[in-house]
Image (cartoon, grey):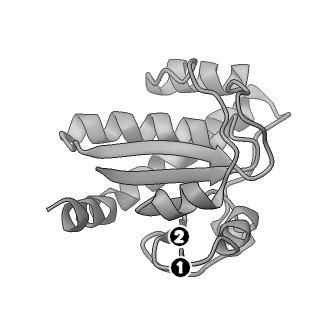
Amino acid sequence: MFNILYVCTGNTCRSPMAVGLLRKILAEEGITEVEVTSAGIATLDGYPATDKAIRVAGKRKGVDISGHHSTKMTETLAHNADLIFALSHEHFEFIQECGSVADKLFLVKAFPEAGHADFLHSIKDPIGGTLGDYKRVIDELEREIKRALPAIREKITARVT
């Protein structure tokens, strides 16, 4: 099983939306043998996704993230992942501290290129924002996932076969 991990701050907005989107896209593409999960660098276990994230994911993209509960980022999660997507440069830098992850850690907007741990390749956190902010983020996430899908597929195929 290939393991993809999305990481953001509170694990209640960006990363749950990204997980829902990627799961849907992989299913539509017939790509199996992949586990897609998420975690937050500044959260505790068990918080639900925000109401706005649930609403936007469902109504705008047909993705149900209502059952999501936050998970705190740990070194174990980093080491067990085959591919780690940080949503911002702060998350990227935090995860680098886990050690031995350089070959599988990427910013969502930079993948498949390594590095680029900067503000320009970060996805802005919509927490506390308007419904429009959440719509912009989920649209951006979908564009980035679709753009990166050929490289994601290649990594899955290389690992699973």
Q: Is residue 78 left or right of residue 120?
A: left
Q: Position of residue 153 (x, y in %)?
A: 26, 58
Q: How many marks?
A: 2
Q: Position of residue 114 (x, y in %)?
A: 51, 80
Identity, as a three-letter code, of the amino acid under mark 1: Ala
In depth, the one of 136 and 31 nearer the eye is: 31
Report the residue marked by disc 2. Answer: 105
Mark sitting on residue 63: none
Residue 23 appears in view = yes
Q: Is residue 57 above or below residue 16?
A: above
Q: Position of residue 47 (x, y in %)?
A: 73, 27
Crowding at label 2, few (<14), some or many (≥20) Cα neighbours within 10 Å? many
Residue 108 appears in view = no
Q: Residue at x 24, y 65 (%)?
A: 159
Q: Is residue 121 above or below residue 99?
A: above
Identity, as a three-letter code, of the amino acid under mark 2: Leu
In depth, the one of 36 and 140 nearer the eye is: 36
Residue sitting farthest toward the left: 161
Q: Position of residue 108 (x, y in %)?
A: 54, 61
Q: Are marks 2 and 1 in contact (CB under 8 Å)?
A: yes
Q: Residue at x 80, y 37 (%)?
A: 127
Q: Is residue 38 left or right of residue 24?
A: right
Mark sitting on residue 102: 1
Classify mark 2: helix, strand or loop.
Answer: strand
Q: Residue at x 24, y 45 (%)?
A: 33
Residue 119 image-quadrant placement? bottom right
| Quadrant occupied by the C terminus | bottom left
Q: Is residue 119 left or right of residue 146?
A: right
Cα separation, mark 2 vs mark 1, equals: 5 Å
